[in-house]
Image: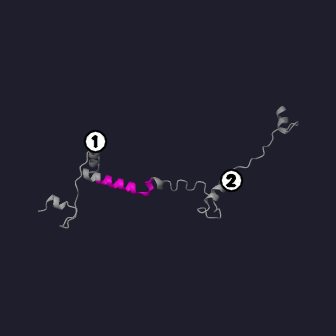
């Protein structure tokens, strides 16, 4: 007959696989109610609910899509893209690319069209007086 401490040793000479390790967890009353509700809802033991929660948390933390630094990749995908390549390697000449984009965004001042000519009424002025 195997004794608990023999079976649960990390280097078990009997070759048996470690089944489980007891863990004691203290829960606040709301967490205890949540655990009981989830166990009933999933028709699972409380231990199974906690195992599933650990697995879900691990998946969430190791998922590249949820990593804060990796989430910024693609934020600006398609934003401000140009239809044609600039004709040079943007990765190597990023300063040039940014400078060209900035200067293209500057609008040349348009000549303002005068509404009224000096001293002579325009056709708009003539129609307004009638």
Instruction: Give the x, y percent position of residue 104.
Output: 68, 54
Is 63 included in the stretch rendered in magenta? Answer: yes
| Residue sitting at the far left | 1
Whole-angstrom CA distance, mark 1 to mark 2, is 60 Å
Residue at the far top: name it. 129
> Is 16 above or below relative to 40?
below
Q: Secondary structure at mark 1?
A: loop
Ranked by sequence position, the earlier of labels 1 and 2 is: 1
Judging by the rendered image, the residue that carries numbered circle 2 is 103
**Residue 93: quarter of image:** bottom right
Which residue sits at x=22%, y=54%? 22
Q: Position of residue 15 (x, y in %)?
A: 20, 67
Select label 1 or label 2 by which is in front: 2
- For label 2, the SS is helix
Magenta-colored segment: predominant secondary structure = helix
Q: Is residue 62 magenta?
A: yes
Q: Which quadrant would residue 30 be assigned to in this image?
A: top left
**Stretch in magenta:** 51-67
Residue topped by disc 1:
28
Front residue of 89 and 82: 89
Pick the quarter of the image with the C terminus.
top right
């Amino acid at each position: 007959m195997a004794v608990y401490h023999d079976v649960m040793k990390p280097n078990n000479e009997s070759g048996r696989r470690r089944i489980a390790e007891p863990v004691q967890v203290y829960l606040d009353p709301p967490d205890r109610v949540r655990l009981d509700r989830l166990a009933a809802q999933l028709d699972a033991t409380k231990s199974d609910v906690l195992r599933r929660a650990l697995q879900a948390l691990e998946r969430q933390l190791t998922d590249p899509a949820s990593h804060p630094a990796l989430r910024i990749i693609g934020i600006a995908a398609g934003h401000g893209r140009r239809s044609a390549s600039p004709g040079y390697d943007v990765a190597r000449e990023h300063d040039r690319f940014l400078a060209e984009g900035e200067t293209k965004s500057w609008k040349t001042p348009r000549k303002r069209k005068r509404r009224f000519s000096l001293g002579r009424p325009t056709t708009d002025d003539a129609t307004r007086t009638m």
